[in-house]
Amino acid sequence: MELSARKRRILADMGIPIWRARDGAFPGLPAAVPAADPPAAPLMPEVESAQAPGAPSETSGPLVSPADVPVEGGVAALDWPELEARVRDCTACAELAAQRTQTVFGVGDRRARWLFVGEAPGAEEDRRGEPFVGRAGQLLDSMLAALGLDRRQDVFIANVLKCRPPNNRDPSPDESRACRGFLDRQIELVQPEVIVALGRIAAQHLLGTDQPLGRMRGSLHRYREVPLVVTYHPAYLLRKPQDKAKAWQDLQRARACLTSAPGG
């Protein structure tokens, strides 16, 4: 498939090489292995999978059984307006509720095929009430555009936590558990075909593991029977742009999970 000039510009801005299609590639995306990136010091040890980027293979089984994470407090019966109101009024985490400007429910197409999950809102997200804004959000938008996607129409974007932790600290296990029912209900309502976990924290909380990002990347996981792919957080890619090509491989792996690739 020949890339449009717009997509070529987007890929160039992301620092991703333009790849030529080859036999065996899944439809709708160029597929080739880019030249090796210069060695970089990631935030944690990187362990690469030998698996080809366009050919997903599952781990031996889900790391978290759906039964391990109950949906409590009647959240499982809520529709979108009621769920959004419940999130807005939530005070389960007293510290977070006392310090937030507003909750960050999520944004996008509520019947999307793609669901992107980050860890928690930052200062700008807390101010604006929308996930992934600012420079990291702009990079995420470029990543989506490279796939022919748009955050308002083709994907739904949410976080593990709906409130900003003070000083942007990592979410605690108790906070993650308190918010899990909200995210699970969003997943049930959206019914995505694939989930993309953005960054180590989101992936660890969703998969119930303490494995480093490098061990979670390169394999196909499942969360509540939905295929889940782990990739870098856009904020990390702003610091380590040489890893953008690896993130592009992850997005290809996620796209291969869709029932039909053309059109995202």
Image (cartoon, rainbow, N blue to C red):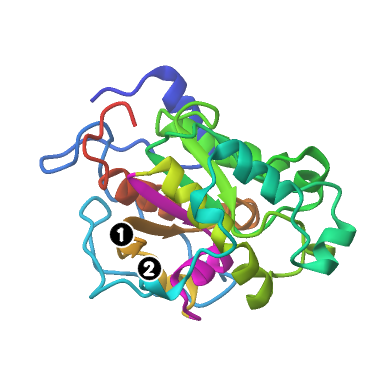
Query: Is residue 152 left or right of 245 when viewed as pictured?
Result: right
Q: Determine which residue is flagged by label 1.
A: 225
Q: Which residue lies furthest to the right in this view?
A: 98
In the drawing, does residue 59 fall left or right of residue 163? left
> What are the residue bounds of the magenta stretch?
193-210
Asked if residue 240 shows in the view, the reply is no
Q: Determine which residue is flagged by label 2.
A: 66
**Residue 79, how many percent across, how many down?**
53, 40
Res 85 label: none
Disc 1 to disc 2: CB gap under 8 Å? yes
Decide which of 106, 213 is in the foreground and name it. Answer: 106
Foreground of the two, 202 or 173: 173
Which amino acid does the dot numbered 2 rest on? Pro
Image quarter where the C terminus lies is top left
Q: Residue furthest top?
A: 5
Q: Looking at the image, which residue is at 30% across and 62% down?
A: 220
- Residue 204 magenta: yes
